[in-house]
Amino acid sequence: MAKRTFSIDIGGSGIKGMVLDRKARPVNERVRIKTPERASPKSVLKVIRKLAAVQPAFDRVSIGFPGVVEFGVTHSAPNLKGDWSEVPLAALVSDITLRPCRVINDADMQGYGAIQGRGVEMMITLGTGMGAAIFTNGHLAPNLELGHHPWMGGESYEQRLGDAARKRIGNSRWSRRVAKAVDQMLVIWNPRVLYVGGGNAKKVGVKLPRRVKPVDNLAGILGGVRLWDDEAH
């Protein structure tokens, strides 16, 4: 019998989850619970427990997490208010659900939901912060924290392109910043396709190059199936 995946997207404003079949087709409607203001591991696990309780039957769990993750252990979460250093999130969620669990960075999981699996493909996510992921022939190069790389005026990509900056300078000016950042990424990384997703992707009000493809935010959940196909995890 084909395995079902309970896929979870942990974001700065909401935690979403749904069950997917083997071909990443939704089995149920996506359920969203607001991210706790004090998003400590304990409070986030409480939300995951609530989400799991209302899902149809599933065989495994995938989680996209907004920070650095190695082998199911979180090391940082800049956009969550809590101490996420050395938290064995995969093991803790396995204890809650009694199912195997894999955890990766949320941009990585969104990339899995978007890529075609040919050549070099890149994913950036525009939301509370900025995430990024690189894939080669469908395989992830993990822990690319491009959002925290210095970019302009002594500030990082995340500081210049995150939601706080968008609200401060207005959508028009922010969109031009996104275009400038995209142009630079295309030159440096030279991906066959650069996917742009996240909650603010739809707010980009300028035309981007042909190699740039917008991605629905649902990809952050759909990628949970492909995560189990990449044996790097």
Image (cartoon, rainbow, N blue to C red):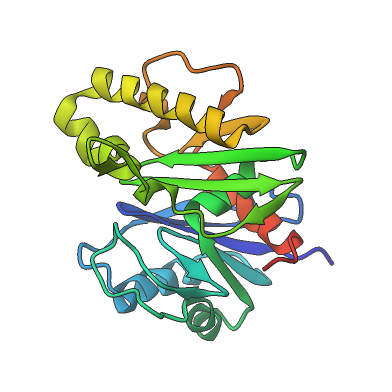
Left or right relative to 137: residue 93:
left
The residue positioned farthest toward the left in the image shown = 168
Tell me how many marks there are.
0
Q: Which of the image's four quarters has the C terminus? A: bottom right
At 76% from the left and 50% from the top, the residue drawn is 23
Residue 121 rendering spot, x and y as whole percentages: 65, 38
Q: Position of residue 88 (x, y in %)?
A: 47, 81
Q: Horizontally, is 167 left or right of 30 in the view?
A: left
Q: Is residue 86 above or below residue 53?
A: below
Answer above or below: position of 160 versus 106. Answer: above
Task: Say which quarter of the image contains residue 59.
Answer: bottom right
Task: Give the residue furthest to the top.
Answer: 207
Task: Give me the residue at 34% from left, 74% from top.
Answer: 84
Say which quadrant the N terminus sits in. Answer: bottom right
Visible in this render: residue 186? yes
21 lies left or right of 45? right
- Residue 18: give x, y in percent of width and height: 55, 56
Question: Which sits in the foreground, 223 or 34?
Answer: 223
| Foreground pick, 56 / 221 | 221
In the rendered image, the vertical position of residue 100 relative to residue 210, given as above or below: below
Question: On screen, 14 above or below 89?
Answer: above
How far across and how far down the image is residue 39, in percent? Answer: 27, 67
User: What is the quadrant of residue 150 in the picture?
Assistant: top left
Q: Can residue 20 be seen in the rendering of this structure?
A: no
Residue at the image point whose x is 53% and y is 83% from the top: 91
Q: Residue at x 49, y 40 (%)?
A: 124
In this picture, residue 33 sits left or right of residue 71: left
